[in-house]
Image (cartoon, helix red, strand yellow):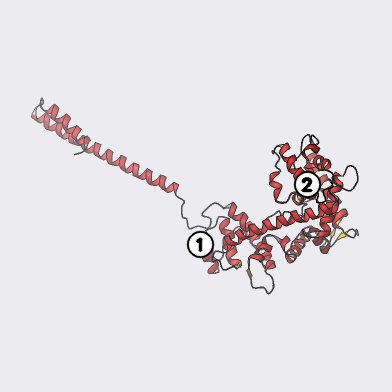
């Protein structure tokens, strides 16, 4: 018998020995009624505990909901299979903006992350001295244009190899059957899954040729990706991408054909009169309209000044005031040796304070922010001893 029942009966028996028989019977009935109430209360508490346990367990486990978006987007997975907005070692971004980190990327290569803003200045200075020694191949304690050109090509190749390495993982993510080829539909399923859509449901709808009912923004991205996908499909076109073609899809700088496509897209966005060429006014046009305050005006002034200099001094190779697609393609080709030499001369000119057309260690340390993005304090202290 349960404890509550035993307690109720014990009290009843103890009191009944001194009560009238009728009273004793009434007391017993009341005791039994109390036992039934307490028993029902105990059962209710047990049921409540079970319900609470089930609710908490359900919240702890991910729900398998059969709706379009059944999970949060996996940003890591999305980044792995989407073409990056920024390409290391390429002078223009995908949207036509100048690559602000270009000098650092081609000078540091894969070591860019080692020069962080919060790194110890003395540690960064030591790394920069080591780089200087590597670039100075003839060991004359200065860096000439040819030495810098070779170094730029070497660092650009490092970015290329890093992209190839990352592409292997990305390709594996979108090639679930491992047959070495990816169809547009296979990629589309993985892309939408990375955006939070139910992968199985999307695959079934595509198989049945049903409308996916995605939002307008996602649909626009899909259409852009599809165009890019078929551009990366080398002839004879089979609508399948192998690992090398997928690399071109993600990184157009690895393919001459895709580099042309990237240039075409940039010109299309900047070309205002539709002649498939760029004038200076088109190239320096502000992307966000007129400035609303002085700070914005300063930013706009910098935008115009930087792009005007780049257009006139570098991109417009024949200086006729017009940039053709061919000129822009040559300018953007990261493995163009002529461009690398011009870039080497530009980088030297920035820090060449004694105007001898070479860079000494003191000059590179003084202009460390230009080369590494990290400003060194007391750059000249003990330079010769450390070197």
Q: Residue at x 61, y 56 (%)?
A: 80
Where is residue 196 drawn, in percent x and y? 55, 55
Where is residue 372 drawn, in percent x and y? 75, 44
From the viewer's side, name the closer residue of 33 and 182: 182
| Residue 165 location, quadrant | bottom right
Q: Is residue 220 left or right of residue 145?
A: left
Above or below, 68 relative to 43: below
Q: Alpha carbon of mark 2 to alpha carbon of mark 1: how far?
A: 55 Å
From the viewer's side, name the closer residue of 186 and 69: 186
Considering the numbered disc 2 on the image, is that residue within a helix, a strand or a loop?
helix
Residue found at the far top of this picture: 18
Where is residue 295 drawn, in percent x and y? 78, 40
Above or below, 233 relative to 195: below
Residue found at the far bottom of this picture: 236
Q: How many marks?
A: 2
From the viewer's side, name the closer residue of 206 and 35: 206
Tag on residue 133?
2
**Which residue in the structure is indicated by mark 1?**
200
Q: Residue at x 63, y 65 (%)?
A: 243
How many other residues sit within 10 Å of disc 2, few (<14), some (14-19) or many (≥20)? Answer: some
The N terminus appears in which quarter of the rendering? top left
């Amino acid at each position: 018998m349960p404890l509550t029942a035993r307690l109720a009966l014990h009290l009843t028996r103890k009191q009944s020995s001194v009560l009238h028989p009728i009273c004793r019977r009434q007391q017993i009935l009341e005791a039994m009624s109390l036992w039934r109430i307490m028993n029902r209360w105990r059962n209710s508490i047990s049921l409540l505990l079970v319900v609470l346990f089930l609710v908490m367990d359900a919240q702890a486990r991910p729900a398998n909901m059969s709706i379009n978006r059944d999970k949060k987007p996996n940003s890591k997975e999305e980044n792995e299979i989407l073409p990056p907005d920024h390409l290391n070692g390429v002078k223009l971004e995908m949207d036509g903006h100048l690559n602000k980190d270009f000098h650092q990327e081609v000078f540091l290569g894969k070591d860019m992350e080692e020069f962080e803003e919060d790194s110890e200045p003395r540690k960064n200075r030591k790394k920069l001295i080591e780089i200087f020694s590597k670039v100075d191949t003839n060991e004359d304690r200065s860096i000439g244009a040819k030495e810098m050109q070779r170094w730029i090509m070497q660092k650009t190749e490092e970015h290329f190899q890093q992209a190839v390495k990352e592409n292997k993982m990305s390709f594996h993510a979108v090639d679930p059957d491992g047959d070495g080829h990816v169809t547009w539909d296979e990629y589309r399923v993985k892309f939408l899954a990375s955006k939070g859509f139910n992968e199985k449901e999307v695959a079934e709808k595509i198989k049945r040729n049903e409308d996916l009912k995605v939002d307008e923004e996602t649909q626009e991205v899909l259409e852009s990706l599809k165009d890019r996908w078929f551009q990366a499909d080398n002839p004879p076109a089979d609508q399948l991408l192998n690992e090398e073609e997928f690399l071109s899809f993600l990184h157009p700088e690895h393919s001459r054909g895709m580099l042309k496509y990237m240039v075409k897209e940039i010109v299309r966005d900047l070309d205002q009169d539709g002649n498939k060429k760029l004038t200076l006014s088109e190239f320096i046009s502000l992307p966000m309209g007129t400035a609303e305050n002085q700070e914005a005006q300063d930013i706009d002034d910098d935008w115009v000044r930087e792009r005007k200099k780049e257009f006139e001094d570098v991109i417009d190779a024949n200086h006729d005031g017009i940039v053709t697609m061919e000129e822009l393609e040559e300018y953007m080709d990261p493995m163009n040796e002529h461009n690398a030499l011009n870039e080497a001369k530009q980088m030297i000119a920035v820090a060449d304070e004694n105007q001898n057309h070479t860079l000494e260690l003191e000059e590179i340390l003084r202009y460390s922010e230009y080369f590494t993005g990290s400003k060194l304090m007391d750059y000249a202290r003990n330079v010769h001893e450390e070197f």
